[in-house]
Image (cartoon, rainbow, N blue to C red):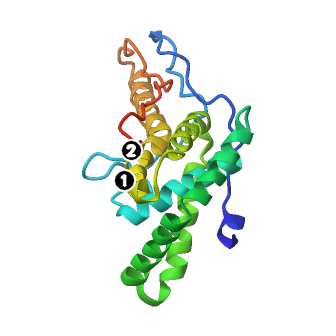
Amino acid sequence: MKLLARVLLSLCGLALFAAPAVAQRFDAPPVAPIGAAPNQTIPVRDGQNRYSTPNRDLNRDEASWHVRAALNVAALGCRDAAEIETVAAYNRLLRAQRDSLAAADAGVKALYRERHGAGWEDIHDRQMTRLYNFFAQPTAHDGFCLAAREVLARADTVEPIQFADFAAEALPRLEAPFTDFYRNYETYRVAYAAWQRGDAAPAEMASADIAPRQLSALVP
């Protein structure tokens, strides 16, 4: 609870998807994705061309705990027509997966102790704050809330013994709205640089209105 009190949840995003892709005029600058801030900063890509988010290269306990964190943010921040069911579904998850989540939490803390020694608690606290703030970014709020509701609906059918496998599949789905935004912003940034140079404008700008990914691969 101490950690949550310090997390800066930027949860005021409204309609945060860009309009469908349209042809760009040669005499007008490309338009940034809706929700992008001036001089938007996005994570760099790593050596495998993946964005350096808090959800890279996790073990099973970490993936389970990161899913729990993401869904916690959704329960706190997805204030929409479905918010009552979102909160209820999250509370059901906490009850049904109490033991598996407790084991995941213990496993994550043991990992930090092993890696960081006596100062592990401060490092763990900072990383968890970074994780919560990642899922609270307003640039993908609507898509994240949709993904969280879908994951919570599937979680109702997951046995505790299956939860780690479920989390490994669910976490990329919860992260996808944010990485989709990053890709769309990169496309805009390249097009804008071309426009500033006077190059021919791209025939089409990528849209952030990404079709929701399906959860058919998740453990039933």
Q: Does the residue at mark 1 contact the one at mark 2 (Cβ under 8 Å)?
A: yes
x 70%, y 50%: residue? 76
Residue 148, percent across and down? Answer: 56, 42
Cα separation, mark 1 vs mark 2, equals 7 Å
Q: Which residue corresponds to the image point at 38% horizontal and 46% vertical from the top-left?
A: 169
Q: 108 or 37, which lies in front? A: 108
Displayed quadrant of residue 26: top left
Q: Position of residue 17 (x, y in %)?
A: 57, 27
The kind of secondary structure element at disc 1 is helix
Q: Residue most toward the left?
A: 48
Quarter of the figure with the N terminus:
bottom right
Relative to 2, does residue 205 appear above or below in the rendering? Answer: above
Amino acid on which disc 2 is placed: Val
Question: Which of the labelled discs sits on residue 219, or is there none?
Answer: 2
Say which of 217 and 19 sits in front: 217
Q: Which residue does the image show at 46% across and 68% down from the upper left?
A: 104
Vertical arrangement, residue 115 with respect to residue 3, above or below: below
Q: Residue furthest bottom?
A: 118
Q: Residues within 10 Å of mark 1 (few under 14, many from 20)?
A: some
Image position of 153 (left or right of 165): right
Residue 18 in the image, given as x and y percentages of width and height: 55, 23
Task: Find disc 1 in the rendering and name its residue.
Answer: 165
Nearer-the-camera pick, 138 or 106: 106
Q: Which mark sits nearer the N-terminus, 1 or 2?
A: 1
Name the secondary structure under disc 2.
loop
Query: Is any atom of residue 42 visible in this view?
Result: yes
